Every structure is written in C-alpha cells, then in structure tokens.
Image (cartoon, grey):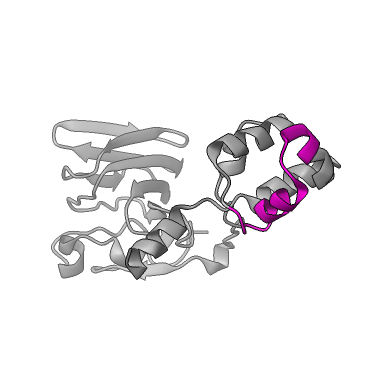
Amino acid sequence: MDAVSRELRTRRRPLVGAQVRKLRTDRGLTLAQVGERTGLNVGYLSQVETDKASPSLETLAAIADSFDVPIAWLLMDAAPPPRVVRRDERRLEPLPMGGQLEEVDGGYARGLRIVEGRMPPGAATGLMTDAGEEHHLVLEGFVRLRQGDFVADLGPGDYLVWDGAFPHSAENIGDCPCRILICTPGPNSISNSLSPHARTGQGTLHLAEAGKAG
C-alpha cells in the first residue's frame, strides 16, 4: 500500500474516541462500568477513547447499547464550529457595468453560494445563467423574474426556484429598492461564481446596486 492509499484509508477511518468519552462522562459512567456493560476490558476502552484502537462495528454497537444511543452517534464526524458573519464583514464583489454581489455566507457554506442582491427602481438585469437550482426569496420590494416564456411578479416573502442553467433575468418593477436572497450550489467564493458573460460585460449579472441600501 503506497503512502497516498494509507492516507486516504486513515482519513476514512472514523475517530470515535472523543464521542465515546463524551457520552460516557455525560452519563457519569466509569470505564469499568462501561466494561461491565459491554464485556470489554478497561484497557481496550481507554484505547478506544484515545483513538489508539480501531473498534469493529460489533464493538461499536456494544458501546452504543451501553449508552442507549444509536450506533450512528458514535460515527458522526466532529461538527465544524459555528460561524458568525457580521454584516460589515461580508465580502463584496464588484461586477462589470457597475454593482456588486454581497456574500452573505462569508464563504463558509459548503457546496452552497448565498448572496444578497439589490436593484434600484426600474433596474433590470440582462440574461444570465448559473449552474443548478437557483432559489430566490424576495426580502423587500417587487421584482419580475423571467425565464423563457415564464414570467412571475414577486413581492416580499415570495419564493421562486428554477434551473439556473437556462437563461433568465430580473427586473425591479416597484418604486423602491428591491432586495433578493439568492441561493445556488457552486463555489463558496463569489469571485469564482461569475459567468463568462458577466466577466466580459456581455450581460449584467449585477443584482446589487453599488453601496448598501438604507
């Protein structure tokens, strides 16, 4: 087995020690008590808790039963720490022909892009495309969304989803700025999310007017 294969195998091996230790201490149990419930010796259980031993599924099932929890609780990867993105910390991406996209998620969302777009009254985008489903939630104002022969006029609280791979456009049909929350699969970084048309200025992908409304 080469070094790469060993590394990949190591990455796939779940590290259950911290979870086993937490479940045990949360219940006020000693290693000896868990050993009595599972039939495992204290030394081995200690190695499991320090990730020095790789327990079989049968062993994990016995440990889970001793805590009265599903075995899946022992196999869950460590959750990433919560992230907070303050309003003034959001990245802004200037776009051709003016405007900007505001990165709501701070780039922390995995496999998801969340941006907020703003359009002043009367503003309209050109045709644009995006990979995968595109979800829209109107936060403020009124917007007309078009895709082929489909037209929808949306107001605050209205939601629309479509396949972003087909050309579509948006127009502010109200008398006040329009704010839309847009979620799509794709790169975390908004700097990597622009279509070739937007990069060359052959269309207006800007959904945010320059500067923050209000």
Whether residue 94 is situated above or below residue 56 in the rendered picture? below
**Magenta-colored span:** 35-53
- At a point 71% along the width and 48% down the height, the residue shown is 45
Relative to 196, 19 lies left or right: right
Q: Position of residue 15 (x, y in %)?
A: 57, 53
Dividing the image into 4 quarters, which one contains the N terminus?
A: bottom left
In x, y percent, where is residue 151? 23, 32
Please indicate, yes or no, whether residue 67 appears anywhere in the rendered image.
Answer: no
Q: Residue at x 34, y 47 (%)?
A: 184
Give the image location of residue 172, x and y in percent.
Answer: 32, 46
User: What secondary structure is the stretch in magenta mostly built from?
Assistant: helix
In depth, the one of 36 and 8 nearer the eye is: 36
Q: Is residue 13 above or below residue 68?
A: below
Whether residue 7 sits left or right of residue 60 in the image: it is left
* Magenta stretch holds residue 36: yes
User: In the visual, does 62 lie left or right of 184?
Assistant: right
Q: Quadrant of residue 65?
A: top right
Note whether 202 is above or below 155 in the view shown.
below
Q: Quadrant of residue 188?
A: bottom left
User: In front: 100, or 77?
Assistant: 77
Residue 125 image offset from top left, x and y in percent: 24, 53
- Residue 51 falls in which quadrant of the image? bottom right
Question: In the rendered picture of this protein, how many numbered marks are placed on residues?
Answer: 0
On screen, 113 above or below 164? below
Residue 48 visible in image: yes
Identify the residue shown where x is 42% and y is 41%.
Answer: 138
Is-magenta flag for residue 212? no
Q: Is residue 121 left or right of residue 36?
A: left
The residue under the point 23% across, 48% down is 131
